Image (cartoon, rainbow, N blue to C red):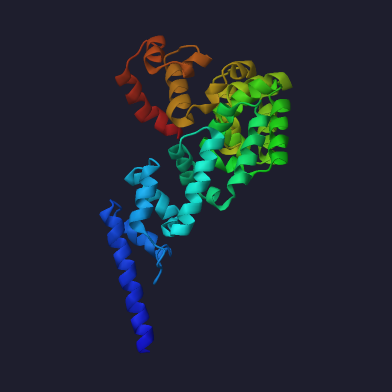
Amino acid sequence: CTSSSTSTSSSNSSSDATVRALMQRGITQAAAEAIVQRGAASSGRSDVDVEGCVSALQRDGLSVARLQRLLVAVPGLLDSQRLTRALDLVGALAETMEAARSEVWSAVLSYAQLLGHRSDTLAHKFEALKSLLGADTAAARAVSLAHPRVLSFNSTTLGEKVAMYEVMLASPRTAVTAALTRKPLLLCMSVPRVRARALSIHEALMCSNEQLGRLLLACPHVLTIDFETNVKPKLQLLLQEARLSPIDIVTHPALLTLSLTRRLLPRLLFARSRGRPITAFTFKSTEEVFLNSVQSDVTAFRSFCATEVMKRK
């Protein structure tokens, strides 16, 4: 019993010392306690080196704020052996990507599972991604850093996704690469989900495959948002109430990215109340241009939104 009490006391003392050491390097008390509680500095661990860990990570360009987020997400980095492996992996991946080490650490912050892979495996997957994107290192780097989860997929899975987008967007590989670079989340989404969303848009607009491809190529973002709760209500307003044509939406796909309650509905109702014609530019234009087109001012528009628009929400 005495031995157990001594062990517990030693554990608490070690944890408290680690918390204090982290706080001395700028980590908040709450974050430091969270790191310790998650097991980064368990009792009697002689390989926990707060000073060495923090110094090594700051040399890689991590600010105190980012360092704190990293250690909360991956508290095991206080283990000197694990830290060494992580530093080696980040260095190898930075070299493969032709990126700064701090950029790779940012990717780790958003997808900590990267540290669970071997550096040679990640390098191979990056090269496969680069090949699929037309041997474009900059494009592969942009995609990998924005959504590092893409490096968890094998080359076959990525190849199937890129091939699907080539068919769906009815465009050459260079154009598809540009679209995927703008919206890399598309490479992390499941094939069935993407196909279902594209089909829903296709059926709602009753457009040709070519027209659908033009829309998705210009605005790939629409594939990343839910159709039923987001895109469908916008299409209903634009097609049924605003009386725009499907071609209007194909030509101006950014309309589908505008807020329904803060942009589309208020402008539709206000322009209609002023007896003005409704076009795509009713919604796309800046507020100043919109108000000039309906011959009104900000005060009248805001007052209208606070009363009439609220009745529709």
Judge whether 20 appears above or below 6 on screen: above
Q: Quadrant of residue 205?
A: top right
The image shows residue 216, relative to residue 93, as above or below, that is: above
For the point 31% across and 57% down, the residue is 22
Q: Is residue 112 left or right of residue 151?
A: left
Q: Nearer the viewer, residue 161 or 266?
A: 161
Residue 13 picture location, percent across and down:
30, 72
Instruction: Examine the image and state in which quarter residue 166 appears.
Output: top right
Residue 297 in the figure: left or right of residue 231: left
Residue 111 in sight here: no
> Along the line of sight, which residue is nearer the eye, 272 or 73?
73
Q: Quadrant where the N terminus lies?
A: bottom left
Screen quadrant of the C terminus: top left
Residue 252, image x, y percentages: 56, 18
Q: How many marks?
A: 0
**Residue 104 image offset from top left, x and y in percent:** 48, 40
Q: Quadrant of residue 75?
A: bottom left
Depth check, front residue: 108 or 91? 91
Say if 288 sits above or below 217 in the image. above
Looking at the image, residue 253 sits to the left or right of residue 162; the answer is left
> In the picture provided, is 165 more to the left or to the right than 94?
right
Which residue is farthest bottom? 1
Residue 57 appears in the figure: yes
Q: Residue furthest left?
A: 24
**Could you tell me which residue is drawn at 48 percent across and 18 percent down?**
284
Tell me the residue at 54%/48% (across/down): 114
Q: Position of residue 102 (x, y in %)?
A: 43, 39
